[in-house]
Image: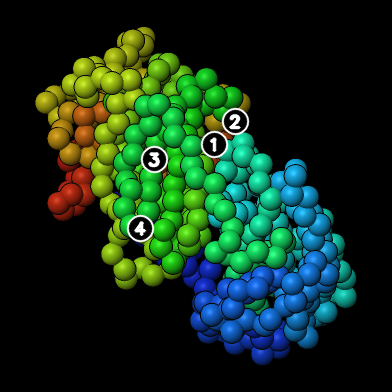
Amino acid sequence: MRKTALFLACALLSMTLCSCAIEPISDVVPEMGHQSDYIYHLNSDQPDENDAPEVPVDNGPRVLCDTEDFTVTVTSMDNDEKRGVCYVTFEYENTSGINLAFYRAFVTVNGWQTEDYIFYEDVAPGETYTEELELHSYSINGEAITPVDMASFRLTISDADDHWADPLLRENYVLYPSGLTEDQIEIIEREHVPGEQVLVDNKDLSFVIMEIDEEALFGPEIRCYIENKTDEFIDFSIYDMAVNRWAIDPAFFVTLTPGCRQYTNITLDQETTALCGIERIDLLVFDLMVTSSFDFDSDYYVDDQFCVAPNGHSPDDIPLPGRMPVDGEKIIVNDEKFTIILEPLTREGSSLFMNLFIENRMGADVAVALDDFRINGRYDSSNYEYASIPAGSSIYYPAEVVAYSFPDISIEDVESLGCTLVIEKYDPYYGIIFSKKVSTSF
């Protein structure tokens, strides 16, 4: 189910990311246009294999795109090589009759991708917006300070008031502030740290777990190095993760541009890890999927499960999670397949929480679905909850039901909360393993 949901999400993302060629607004047709393969190399001596317009090697103004509806210009580039900083000034001009959204993403500096320079701005008809951008080489590729020799990005221009309309432009651009060619640019290699674990390293990509910081500000962080060695955009995603045999969703999804690399963090929710009593990460089990960002008919680059023991423990040495009994809890089932315990209902502000503990003793990944919520046995709540539980792991799941989902009754009058609890499996085929109506009260 997770793979199916991820595929559908990627399909929706693809519909958003497909683009038309550069056309005036009045000529854009409802049908989806083609995805542009042009990469415009600006301020470089190298020949452009995609027949992009030639631009002189200087730091004067140059036009990125110019139509009757918009113009985007790089008006200046000032490269401070000693400090590893490049100051770039952009002008976004809207000459159309509608509000235009200018969006820049997938920014790279010297072959390293960063999320620091994402840009979005709505520009009214007849107006021009000026952006002064500072590009830094350091902190992106570690702490190395090098000249900003190359910066690339994807620029999208669209109708700001119609998010379903096809983009008017979506193109990839490369700037060469120092005038070097791509072959002359030095790309800083990644750092190597003691105890790092190389999970994947082949001709297409790399995925390395470098270190773990349990004391990070926003929750435990798993620092990773990822690299895209292909000539297409690829997506890295992690799902069905268990930490010390606790099921925790990391919500990790990163798109990497062709030929780029990035340091990135898998951040675990602080409240969830505290709730599960996780102070040190001794065992990680997760599925890693790497796919083409736009070609959904292509094979997966990676679709495998990985088991990582950061502190050298054997997975068999990691005990199953334990929990302290709670007064008023209900044991829904306790057999060779599962333990399902429902704790008393709790309320925080305008939210109700149905607190579940589920231990999966099966040798297969399963999912829990909660549906058909009812307040006091009578009032419907428009709520649905879903979570994965990897094989041999447990989950502590506080299902939240917010007050606006049950408008027919005040939260102060709530006495009980019930739902239908379903345990499902999907491999090798779909099946419902367990289903029961359950309820809890204060």
The amino acid sitting under disc 3 is Val
The amino acid sitting under disc 4 is Asp
Q: CA distance from mark 1 to mark 2?
A: 6 Å
Residue 125 position by quadrant: bottom right
Q: Is residue 305 visible?
A: yes
Q: From the image, which quarter does the C terminus lie in?
A: top left
Residue 103 position by quadrant: bottom right
Q: Residues within 10 Å of mark 2 (few under 14, many from 20)?
A: few
Q: What SS does tag 1 mark? A: strand
Q: Earlier in the sequence, mark 1 or mark 3?
A: 3
* Residue corresponding to mark 1: 402
Q: What SS does tag 2 mark? A: loop
The amino acid sitting under disc 1 is Val
Q: Earlier in the sequence, mark 1 or mark 2?
A: 2
Q: Earlier in the sequence, mark 1 or mark 4?
A: 4
* Residue corresponding to mark 4: 204
* Residue corresponding to mark 2: 350
**Rendered location of residue 152, percent (x, y):** 62, 62
Residue 201, above or below 121:
above
* Residue corresponding to mark 3: 208
> Which residue does the image show at 45% across and 38% down from the upper left?
224
**Rendered location of residue 127, percent (x, y):** 88, 71
